[in-house]
Image: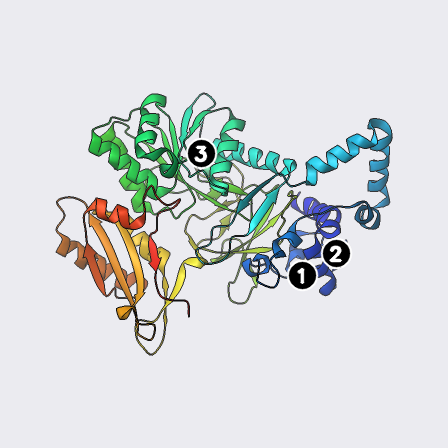
Amino acid sequence: MQNRLLARFVEERLLPFSPFYRALFAEHGIRNGSIQRVEDLARVPFTTKGDLAPTADDPDRPRRFILQPTRELIGQHWSRRKRLGLVAKALLRGKKRVGADLRREYYPIFMTFTTGRSAQPVPFVYSRHDLDIVSEAGLRLCETLGFLPDERGLNVFPFAPHLAFWQVALGAMEVGNLMLHTGGGKVAGTEGNLRGISRMRPHNLLGVPGYIYHMLREARVRGQRIEGLKTIVLGADAVPAGLKLKLRTLCAELGSPDVRVLGTYGFTEARMAFAECPTPDGTSSGYHVFPDFGIFEIIDPVTGEVLPDEADGELVYTPLQGRGTTVFRYRTGDLVQGGMRDGPCPYCGRTLPRISSRLSRATSVHSVSLKKVKGTLVDLEELGRLLADDLEVEEWQVHLRKKDDDPHEVDELIVYVAARPGTNEAALEDRLRSSIQSTCEVRPNEFRFMPIPALLERVGMERELKEKRFLDTRSPA
Ligand SMILES: [Zn+2]
């Protein structure tokens, strides 16, 4: 099925209508019709974040990735049979209808943006046809998560032109759930979200991990009971196993025992998200992906060589259905341990391929010069996972800065921690120091303990769309 969809997608959509890929294929001598099977993808060069990013010289670069059909391009590239189909349709249903259908299929009506920490945001546009796909992907997402049609939900993903909010909103409408979309902490405030919970009594709660934890902790402080909660769905950020446990414990204290905490994986360039299915505590099914919507490859991040599905490597994504902004063989930069598995899911029985949930985003690897001699690569996400996983750490922030704010000095790594009340801070610091050193091979210069409200202020909880867990105040080298 993927071979057939891929061949058609390249032949009828990508090559005729994408200015970027038409040029790229011509440059590499890839002729129309020569991509017939998934294995043929290896002939196509990768697309990276850098190819899409607008530059000072060329601010319009993202436009080249938008499929842009014209009468001339259809005439040049579509097969005689396909063109005759268009003519027949015009005769039967009118030219106007043909035009309206093409417009529905291709004309951009919606957009989201990438959210890189440093890079310029890149717009991704969607046609009506693409939004139908987001809805269908959302329906599948909700079904994978185990939502039932008569359940209620509360969506606290931040209201923004980012994928997460819209994927959840459209998915919930498609599955037929009554869902309140509050816009998250920045829009409704924790006060408003907690009131939403007490009025709605939702079965399902969806949002960014840091904010959901903050909101439920706030409920505990206020003595609010939350009963009947079944599933918490986390997205748009890493989901450490320890945080899942912390959330489950917190929910039990609030009055909802046996809450399942599930992760999702989505990215702007795929224009959809994938989910874990319900599993027993401490296990993960991996993210169930949709083989009719796209192809995932696992590659060696250094050589670019295609690896077997179950290998550790970088995820590369190729869509099979999209219009609007379309990437092809896109390097996500996300490294996965344990690759992808075929075969029925041991938990839900679905036969969709599943991506291992041990994911780390390549953008989170930062070079840090802790000595004057050479830089060390530090995976900040791994460091964050260690902090978020610790049951005695309530809130945290990692700060990279130059010693004395002198650009010629060495880098310093400061860890801010708000500990759970009653914690022995010296013992916690010792434990964190040794686990950080053994896992991340880096030695923080300093640990600073502070009360929860002060640290919430530092990370900008309820003020920012996403909390500032990593602060880098070194000037760009
Ligand atoms: Zn499953």
Question: In the rendering, at what x and y percent does residue 71 appear?
Answer: 81, 45
Type of amino acid under label 3 = Leu
Where is 254 relative to 419, above or below? above
Q: Nearer the viewer, residue 338 or 46?
A: 46
First-in-chain label (1 vs 3): 1
Tell me what residue is drawn at x 31 percent, y 34 percent. 190
Helix, strand or loop under label 2: loop
Where is 118 relative to 295, above or below? below
Spatial distance from mark 1 to mark 2, Cα to Cα? 9 Å
Type of amino acid under label 2 = Ser
Locate residue 57: give its quadrant: bottom right
First-in-chain label (2 vs 3): 2
Locate residue 47: give its quadrant: bottom right
List the residue tagged with mark 1. 43
List the residue tagged with mark 2. 34
Q: Which class describes the residues within 10 Å of circle 1: few (<14), some (14-19), or many (20+)?
A: few
List the residue tagged with mark 3. 145
In the image, 58: left or right of 75? left
Q: Which class describes the residues within 10 Å of circle 3: few (<14), some (14-19), or many (20+)?
A: many
First-in-chain label (1 vs 2): 2
